[in-house]
Image (tube, rainbow, N blue to C red):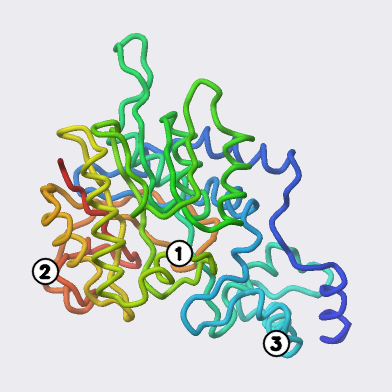
Amino acid sequence: MNIKEVHDSWKQKGFPYYPTNSKWRNEMFNQLITFQRDKLVDRKYKIIGQSAHGLNLAWSYMPHAWGIKCGKMKTPMEVWEDEEHLSKGLNKILSGTFFMKKPAHMITESDMRSMLRRYSGTQMVSNFRPTAAAAMYDIFVDKESPLEGTQAGTVWDPSMGYGGRLLGAIAAGVNYIGTDPCIPTFEGLEKIKDEYGHKHLKYSLNRQGSETFIPEDESLDFVFTSPPYFGWEAYGDEPEQSSIKFSTSDMWKEKFLKQTIANAYKGLKKGKYLALNVANTKQYKTFEEDTVDLAKEVGFEHTDTWWLSLSTQQGGSDTFDVVEAKTAETKQKQQYMGKYTRPNVSGRKFEPTFIFKK
């Protein structure tokens, strides 16, 4: 087959979305809940390793994510819809540029998804790994235990996103409250909740921005999220979207980020924790520092920082064991433009999750 025939064959098949049949989804869910996530956690160096278990399941409920813009980068859907770009991408698979060289008849939907993500100048929106979320809940939230006399704690996820933390909450067995204004994202989250949520636990999903969600006083055991990066990922055109509602970075920081943190403070029980996963970017060079400063202004104490091990390719299937990590002040400037020192582990990248105590 020549490249045009390969292109036309895939266009006829249609976009390579993740499977949506119950059998496949149930297999993915079982892999998530049976995975031994405790081996991802290094309590000494406060590192949570990475595993892709459950990630593809979350993506299967979010087909619209393939077309969401990240800055000026192309979306995977734009590559798919452009004959020249798609043909070039297919040629990269055939020639072995991305991974092992394959003949046309052996190219899989998984190969196509990987190519569409990796194509030059392309960026897909990110999703939080369900295993990492579950590990965080394991660390900070009580579970239901008749022997110990404890009940499952309640968590609030201010920016639900694409289902990683919801699936993590289901896997960890905690009550979950979530907020997010994006309509198709919310619809996907509702389906995840309905299909996999535990009957004896509570899940309250709210289609609204976190800055407008006012939790009951001291009703929450943990607040944990990865907030949006102002102006980077265009999640939707709903008027409730924070980057649409607050058009300047200063306004967004004060009226969205700080207000969300204040709402978390109001809702948390005394002595409980807020965890915010953020990272400085070229577009927002002081996101980490600003987040810590705002939390302190609200009244929180910055007590700790956990580190999330990142994949170099979003959506990969790799699973890594936690390795011993040492912080290295000398590598600070090389690795990072901010003031919070990353763990020094060869071949790894990390993002901080700042822990704040009420």
User: If you read the primary sequence from the N terminus, does the residue marked by circle 1 or circle 2 appear first?
Assistant: 1
Label 3 secondary element:
helix
Quarter holding the C terminus is top left
User: If you read the primary sequence from the N terminus, does the residue marked by circle 2 or circle 3 appear first?
Assistant: 3
User: Marks 3 and 1, how far apart in space?
Assistant: 35 Å
Q: Position of residue 189 (x, y in %)?
A: 57, 46
User: If you read the primary sequence from the N terminus, does the residue marked by circle 3 or circle 1 appear first?
Assistant: 3
Q: Return the residue at label 1.
A: 241
Rendering quarter of residue 195: top right
Q: Is residue 126 left or right of residue 26?
A: left
Q: Say which of 8 and 335 sits in front.
A: 8
Q: Is residue 145 above or below residue 212?
A: above
Q: Position of residue 104 (x, y in %)?
A: 81, 74
Mark 1 or 2, closer to the camera: 1
Q: Position of residue 289 (x, y in %)?
A: 17, 67
Give the residue at x 39% y 64%: 228
Amino acid tagged 2: Glu
Q: Which mark is residue 11?
A: none
Rendering quarter of residue 315: bottom right
Give the residue at x 24% y 51%: 306
Q: Return the residue at label 2.
A: 329
Amino acid tagged 3: Lys
In the picture as drawn, the residue positioned furthest to the top comes out as 147
User: Marks 2 and 3, how far apart in space?
Assistant: 43 Å
Label 1 secondary element:
loop
Q: Return the residue at label 3.
A: 88
